[in-house]
Amino acid sequence: MNIPWQKSNLLQKRASKVMPLGVNSNFRYWGEGMTPYMQRAKGAHLWDADGNKYIDYRMAFGPIILGHAWDEVNEKVKQEIDLGTLAAMTGELEIEVAEKMVRMCPGLEMVRFACSGTEATMHALRVARAFTGRERIIKFEGMYHGFQDYTLWSTYAPVEAYGNPRSPIPVPSSSGIPRPLNQMIVTLPFNNAEILENTLRAIGETVAAIITEPCMGNCGAIEPQRNFLQFIRKQCDKYDIVMILDEVKTGFRIANGGAQEYYRIKPDLATYAKALANGYPLAALGGKREIMSIIGQGVSQGGTFTNNKPGVAAAWTTLTILQREPVLKTIEKRGRRLMDGIGKILSGRGIPFCMNGYPSMFSYAIGVEKVTDQRSWNESDKDFYLALVEALIERGVMPDHDAREPWFLCYAHTDEEIDETLNIFTDVIKNADRQR
Ligand SMILES: Cc1ncc(COP(=O)(O)O)c(C=O)c1O
């Protein structure tokens, strides 16, 4: 990338002496001498350490639903932290957040908080195992449910390692994941009802949970097709399996009631984090009373920071704003314009592509007409996608560097920013296409 990132590069060198790769999450590392470091962010904009300004479409991987450093959220956090940040005691504000969540999300009757999406999915899996007395988990290839060991399988591996889709090989996504966990995980291609049905016919009675994102939020935002979520729901009912809908990315983003409202589906358990608190750390798992009630009845869940006041205050304010204003409708309108605009520009250049996802969270796969799962998405032209992204970043528009990560919008993206993005996209594609 041809960007003056002198200060970022110096920070990276300094950070690398005390932090592996110079970052605190592998996902924030883009390479040596090409990893931007942050100075500040406000609304829809982000400034890197060198002071370069970007229209941000990463939104911190999804949490920023209102805008960076949203005044009303920050004001409430400031008020609340002056009253104490943590007390090993439950407060009224967190009860209100739980009440709001139950009101907004169709499948929730009870919730428990956590600090991150990883924790929320880890707890949900435990609850499902405890409820069913079974240990096996089914997850879909290319889906990401956080860094816990149970589902960090077949997430980022080269799909060539996955074997035949009728009997996929679960591939751990990290060294250090205990090999025996292989016995407890079954990985399947998303959107394939026949393979799921056959698998359940063989092992359905040993499966505790099917965990799924509503769409492939960590692989090109591929949507469920032919009512696949409803199919999972029916199969879970048939075999008494707990259906866990991982709404860490879709929750409070694609609808106030998340994918449950959008697709009219009630899972048994659901997990949340990201947009729940507009960038502050709060996560949750929730679901049917009958299942959630076993927590505390011989089933453990908790954590010192699970009711941290900044997270709770931010969630309270974010949900209040979502209920009060047409936040998601506004994002939908602007995001739709951006998706359509990008689509027209690509079509205008005769570049084959398919657009996936929702206006608040979308992606396009280049060089393919349809993608349904990670295997088919892998056929897309990721090199050209990356060349485009790098050229966009050079011009001040920042989607994520990884083609799997969707573009995220927030309430603060205005029509002007959408226009500016489309103008830049038009320029960038001309050059990139010429060099192809
Ligand atoms: C669907 C999904 N589940 C879980 C997680 C993990 O959340 P966290 O990064 O807060 O641990 C993520 C993070 O990107 C996610 O996208």
Image (spheres, rainbow, N blue to C red):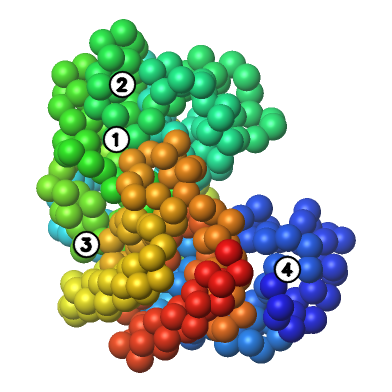
Relative depth, front residue between 83 and 349: 349
Q: Position of residue 50 (x, y in %)?
A: 71, 86
Q: Position of residue 338 (x, y in %)?
A: 32, 75
- At x 66%, y 53%, the residue is 26
On residue 191, which mark appears? 1
Label 2 and label 4: CA atoms lie apart by 41 Å
Reading the chain from its start, which is encountered first: label 3 or label 1?
Answer: 1
Reading the chain from its start, which is encountered first: label 3 or label 4?
Answer: 4
Reading the chain from its start, which is encountered first: label 1 or label 4?
Answer: 4
- Tag 3: residue type? Ala
- The number of numbered discs placed on residues in the rendered structure image is 4
Label 3 and label 4: CA atoms lie apart by 35 Å
Judge from the rendering whether residue 128 lies leftward or rightward of residue 424; answer left or right: left
**To which residue does mark 4 refer?**
34
Q: Position of residue 241 (x, y in %)?
A: 26, 23
In the displayed image of the protein, which residue is found farthest to the left? 264
Label 2 and label 1: CA atoms lie apart by 9 Å
- At x 51%, y 38%, the residue is 155
**To which residue does mark 3 refer?**
255
Image marks 2 and 4: residues in contact by CB distance under 8 Å: no
